[in-house]
Amino acid sequence: MRFLGNTEITWRKGRFKMGYGIYGLTFNTLRGGNIKRLEFFKNPKGEFTHLSGVDTWTVEEWFAALIGELGEFANLHKKVRRGDFTIEEVISALADELADVQTYLDLLAARLRIDLGEATMKKWNAVSVRVGAPIYIDAEDWHFTENQGTKK
Ligand SMILES: [Mg+2]
């Protein structure tokens, strides 16, 4: 195991294997937790809001929630640019907003029965081929390869 900056590199089956994906959160964990947790959400009146799971809200409602979180991120970052805060003062809050974006993005995908991990791998690898990048991602990590990034 070697380290390049703060990124772990290991050799495995003749390929570089980079950190971040090795011990990180998986799409499956996020999806499973997201779906199961929905039944616990209540509005300020104490009423359960997602008793029908992800289908309680329409695609448009999940999309609005996703955009709302992007807006929260944008508003806070705007205040950094304006000088209200330093980036160091709000980096944790910005990370929270991006985490909210990720969570709602998964719920939007779940509402459409899209496997977001599979969709991301498929599209991401297709772009690698398109741009001629010898890098692809799979369920374990990202890898350098001699064969995947062939420009067509
Ligand atoms: Mg938020």
Image: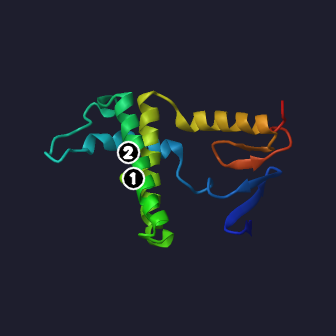
- Position of 13 relative to 2 (above/below): above
Q: Which secondary structure, mark 1?
A: helix
Q: Residue 17 location in percent, x, y?
A: 73, 54
Residues at marks 2 and 1 touching, judged by CB atoms closer than 8 Å: yes
Instruction: Sort mark 2 into few (<14), some (14-19) or many (20+) by Cα contacts within 10 Å.
Output: some
Q: Nearer the viewer, residue 111 or 9?
A: 111
Apparent side of residue 117 relative to residue 144 in the rendered image (left or right):
left
Q: Is mark 1 within 8 Å of ligand 1?
A: yes
Q: Which residue is at 47% across, 33% downward?
A: 109
Quadrant for the N terminus in the image: bottom right
Q: In the rendering, which numbered label is found on residue 68?
A: 2
Q: Residue 99 location in percent, x, y?
A: 45, 53
Check the image and name the residue furthest to the front.
82
Q: Is mark 2 within 8 Å of ligand 1?
A: yes
Query: How many numbered discs, if any?
Result: 2
Q: Which residue is at 43% across, 35% downward?
A: 108
Q: Which residue is at 28% across, 30% downward?
A: 52
- Position of 65 relative to 99 (above/below): above
Q: Nearer the viewer, residue 38 or 60?
A: 60
Q: Residue 138 location in percent, x, y?
A: 67, 42
**Residue highlighted by disc 1:** 72
